[in-house]
């Protein structure tokens, strides 16, 4: 009985020390909207769908036999597309877009896309932008939401206007005009 009392007392003391040492801390800083910057970016995403090194690959697809579309509904693709300064395949690479796209619409015209644009060259080398949005594939001009970022784009928010430059059976080139508010 005495051993149980000592053990219980020891356990209570240890738990009380843990509670004292793990207190919640916070520090508020004043908000200064003048510290925010607005940056406009312009670049091209180059996607290869075929060949030895495709940059977009279907990784899952629903077993639906009634959909005869070239990109059937409920298809999940992973992408790792280069970002370039121009639409030409020889233009300078400034980063890459990695992410996922789900063809979500029953009629295969809507994709829900997540991209992380990692910049590996130029002024924003080492920074990234995250975009997550509904992507209406049949529209010539599309809009995506900027939902975050790292490095120079810390706490980013904004939007991207996307215009198709080239779309065929093996290649997609999209023009991005991005407006980012960040610190």
Image (cartoon, helix red, strand yellow):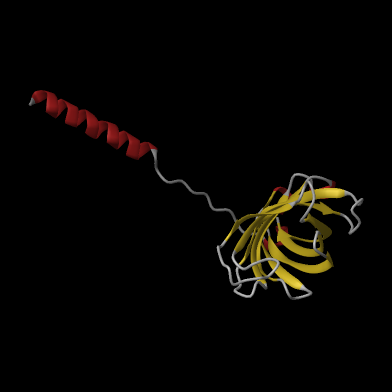
Single out the residue that lies furthest toward the top: 3
| Image x and y of residue 162, in percent | 78, 67
Q: Residue at x 35, y 38 (%)?
A: 20
Mark yes or no: residue 117 visible.
no
To which quarter of the image does residue 9 belong? Answer: top left
In front of the other: 177 or 81: 81
User: Could you tell whether 103 is left or right of 5 in the image?
Assistant: right
User: Could you tell whether 164 is left or right of 8 in the image?
Assistant: right
| Image x and y of residue 101, in percent | 65, 60
To which quarter of the image does residue 180 belong? Answer: bottom right
Mark yes or no: residue 140 visible.
yes
Q: Residue at x 88, y 55 (%)?
A: 85
- Quadrant of the rendering where the C terminus is positioned: bottom right
- Quadrant of the rendering where the N terminus is positioned: top left
In front of the other: 59 or 183: 59
In front of the other: 99 or 152: 99
In front of the other: 131 or 180: 131
Single out the residue that lies furthest toward the front: 65
| Image x and y of residue 51, in percent | 80, 50
| Image x and y of residue 132, in percent | 64, 62
């Amino acid at each position: 009985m005495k051993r149980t009392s000592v053990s219980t007392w020891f356990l209570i003391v240890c738990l009380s020390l843990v509670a004292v040492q793990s207190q919640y801390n916070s520090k508020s800083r004043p908000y200064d909207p003048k510290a925010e910057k607005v940056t406009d970016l312009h670049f091209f995403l180059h996607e290869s769908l075929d060949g030895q090194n495709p940059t977009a690959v279907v990784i899952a697809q629903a077993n639906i036999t009634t959909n005869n579309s070239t990109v059937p509904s409920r298809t999940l693709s992973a992408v790792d597309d280069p970002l370039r300064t121009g639409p030409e395949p020889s233009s300078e690479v400034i980063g890459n877009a990695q992410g996922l796209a789900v063809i979500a619409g029953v009629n295969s015209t809507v994709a829900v896309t997540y991209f992380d644009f990692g910049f590996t060259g130029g002024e924003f080398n080492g920074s990234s932008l995250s975009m997550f949005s509904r992507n209406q594939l049949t529209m010539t001009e599309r809009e995506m939401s900027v939902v975050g970022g790292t490095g120079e784009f810390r706490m980013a928010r904004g939007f991207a206007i996307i215009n198709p430059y080239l779309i065929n059976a093996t290649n997609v080139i999209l023009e991005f005009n991005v407006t980012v508010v960040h610190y």
